[in-house]
Amino acid sequence: MSELNFLSDKFAPNILPEVYAPRLNLRSAFHHAAEKSVVYVSAPAGSGKTVSTLLWLGESKRKPVWIGLDSYDNAPSVFYKQMATGIFSIQPENQAMKQVLTDPAFSASPVEHMVQLLAEMVPEEGFYALVLDDMHMITSGEIRKSLPSVIRRLPRSFAVLILSRHELPEELEPLIHDRGVQIITPDHLRFSEDEIREYFGSLGRFLTPEESRFAYQATEGWAMGVNAMAKSGEISPKSGYIFDQYFKAQVWDKWEEPLQEFCLTTSIADEFDIELASILSGRSDADYIMEQLSRTNSFLSRLHGDTYRYHHLFLDFLREQLSKSGRKTSSLYKKAAEYYRDKKDYSRALRFWLDSGDYNGIDTYLYLFLFENNKGIIADYADFLRTFFVKDFPQAAFKQVPALHILSAWYYYLTSHHREFEEHMDAVYKALPRIALGDSKFVEYAILAYSVDHRTGMLTKIRQFKRFGRYVKKFTEGGLATNIASFSHNMPYMHRSNLDYSDLALDPDSMEKLDKTFAVLLGAEWNYIKYGITACFTFEKGRLKEALTENEQALTAFGEENKDEGLICMLILQHSILWRQRRYIQARRVLDRLTEITRTSAQFFIPNLEAYRTRLKLYEGNKSAASAWLENYYVIETDHIELFRSFQHFTTARAYVVLEDTENALHYLSLLKDFGKNVRRPLDLAEACVLLASLFWAVGKKREAEEELEEALLVLQPFGFILTAADEGASILPVLKRLWTKINRNDYNGELRRTYVHEILLAAHEMSKQQKGITFHLAINSKPIKLSAQQQRMIELLAEGHRNSEICQLTGLKLPTVKTHISAAYKKLGVNNAMDAILKARELGLL
């Protein structure tokens, strides 16, 4: 069977059990909901979401694309690859769709690729249904925010059914226009007494009204309970249905032992295909057993192709029975680990080996997981690791395999949980001699983790490099850092990337010292990085002409063997310099080149490129740009700053300032300030303080503004950096003037140097000529409006309903004079007519 033929039925749903009573009311509810294109089915486990959907699909004759979701799908790259593959199964001969689906860059920009794939669909006759089963497993804000936009791009021939245990999340509300019709609730799904009687009748068992009532009381009308009771052939009048007790007594204990054994051995996996089921059970007829189980009851469902999973309630029951049996399951988990290793799914392979409880031989799986996944796209890599860290590692595993601390430290570093990162790094340092007994690559990985330990400056790390390097016989050719991850973390500036490298600016020989130590981890990338970071420091000091020369030297050192992310960093710096020099034509050419590279070969940079573009517009106080930024699917509300998104979060904070949403702006800036402190990133800390100072000043909190700015400049002063503060131009200028006055007083005994503050003041003044500043609208609206006595009188008379001619009679003033006073009042109030003037005056308490 060819791959394309396989795909054509890969996403077909589980076959409906052969006997299932028609439920006319429920099917009618599904039919009316589907007329609105999107159906949201919300109900607990065991309520019949899946079977009810299958029942409707069978009647509607729509061709389904059924996608069963689990915790491993909770990443945009995985989720949309699943959806894209499912949609492609409808038109498997469509080469344009196949090209999008197989594009290596799919995981870098999954939403954009998904939209492109839908655009390549060829119109055809027929009706389809996309089913997203177990949507409650998807908690990613990016997926939820982007999904409505993607679904709207489906052809009109599609109905979308979203099955979940949870209520409709806020992000999906735009898809629902009629909640009473489009949302299928638990009340819809519960069997009524009449439906229970009808279902039993379809199985050849005819119930009395009293038995129907007993069955309803025992099962509460839930499909799973009704099905279990029907299969048992017995009716219990007990109220409060408990699945595991009833199922064990009435169904499980009546099954033959070989069938029980098959279910128990396969229950260690959340999902399994025929091959894995055969390996776990030792049965050559696993395909027959699985097909029969899925056809004759609703306890086993086919996800797609030959991949199945047990119903959640049944899976819990099986695992409880397996635990009570006292059997040793270690060999089962090892078999699963070996199966996934052979499939090159090293994440699941390592997870299963860990679950085996036997940590001998785990080094092989850890090695494959760390060094063969090649996740150079940081956002995707972080999401990838999240799926692996769904469950905590057993403590015994760390004791026996200390290299696991490196993996854990890297995960907590990527997701910016600094306390956990510190704990695991301390364990790495302590266990380094033991780690070195394994593959030397583990030590290299430890060095890489050490290089981003925020508790130690880079200059200190250089001095202590031999502490690690002596354990490495031979370093990885080409540089480990560039082989297993992104050395820049896909961030726009080299000196503010995977680490804040500012302390290197304190030592003029720092690049030479790095060349003899950590450069070995960077391979050929170091050839230009050493010039690029120096250019960044010069740029931060405001020496733009010199920085441009240094950056051009870095660009010259960039070769064909080097990675695009390095070129991106240099082009961002190039544009930043030219833009500040007001060489806009040259800057535009650089930005066009950067845009083309991002579009064609570096789509992972799309969010940060858009953040950069938006930031330039926000300097002008552009509200449209601010609103557009917040609409992007990757801009999600958060209470936690992750390093690789920090540049985007700063743009989000600025957008809220421009939109005068001070509450959200303060929320993000407070998070960013704490983030900068906790992981010792001086430039992030300083930028957050500068923006807080601008915000506080605009809303009249001048003392707080001065304190924030002083804190920022004390952080930046040792490095001589000025642009982080000066770039805010008109927004920060009044705070700088106030601080300048303070440090020039005779009684000032602080640490700020007058020459340093004066340099920033001059640079900010120059920037203020170029841009309005992000607080432009806030500053205007926060200024108190004072009307003269005559202007106030005019507004009061207008509010009483008098016209200009009547006002002349009441005041004794001539008409031109009245018009002059009214016009002046309008200007102060920012309005153009009498009605708006009255409303504005009332809003300000002037009336």
Image (tube, rainbow, N blue to C red):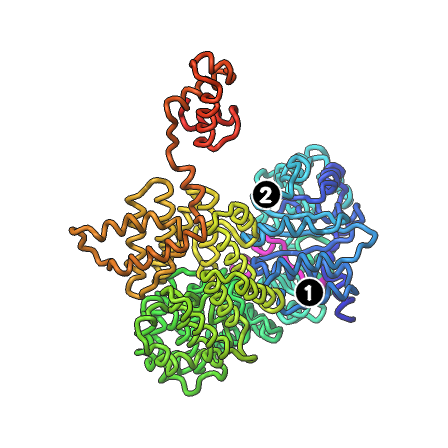
For the residues marked 1 and 2, what is the alpha-carbon distance in whole angstroms? 29 Å
Quadrant position of the C terminus in the picture: top left
Which mark is first along the chain, 2 or 1? 1
Rendering coords of residue 446 (x, y %): 40, 75
Q: Nearer the viewer, residue 568 or 170?
A: 568
Residue under the image location 37 percent in, 78 percent down: 511
Quadrant position of the N terminus in the picture: bottom right
Kind of residue indicated by mark 2? Leu
Q: Nearer the viewer, residue 331 or 689?
A: 689
Residue named by callout 2: 168
| Kind of element beneath mark 1 | helix
Residue named by callout 1: 101
Q: Is residue 306 left or right of residue 325?
A: right
Q: Nearer the viewer, residue 113 or 612?
A: 612
For label 1, count other residues whose C-alpha is less than 10 Å away and answer few (under 14), some (14-19) or many (20+). many
User: Compared to 34, does 480 lie above or below?
Assistant: below
| Kind of element beneath mark 2 | loop
Quick check: is 328 in the magenta stretch? yes
Q: Nearer the viewer, residue 571 or 411?
A: 571
Rendering coords of residue 721 (x, y %): 34, 63
Residue under the image location 35 percent in, 67 percent down: 502
User: Compared to 719, does 296 lie above or below?
Assistant: above
Kind of residue indicated by mark 1? Leu
Q: Residue furthest bottom?
A: 473
User: Compared to 424, does 444 lie above or below?
Assistant: below
Q: Which residues are magenta?
A: 305-329
Rendering coords of residue 762 (x, y %): 34, 56
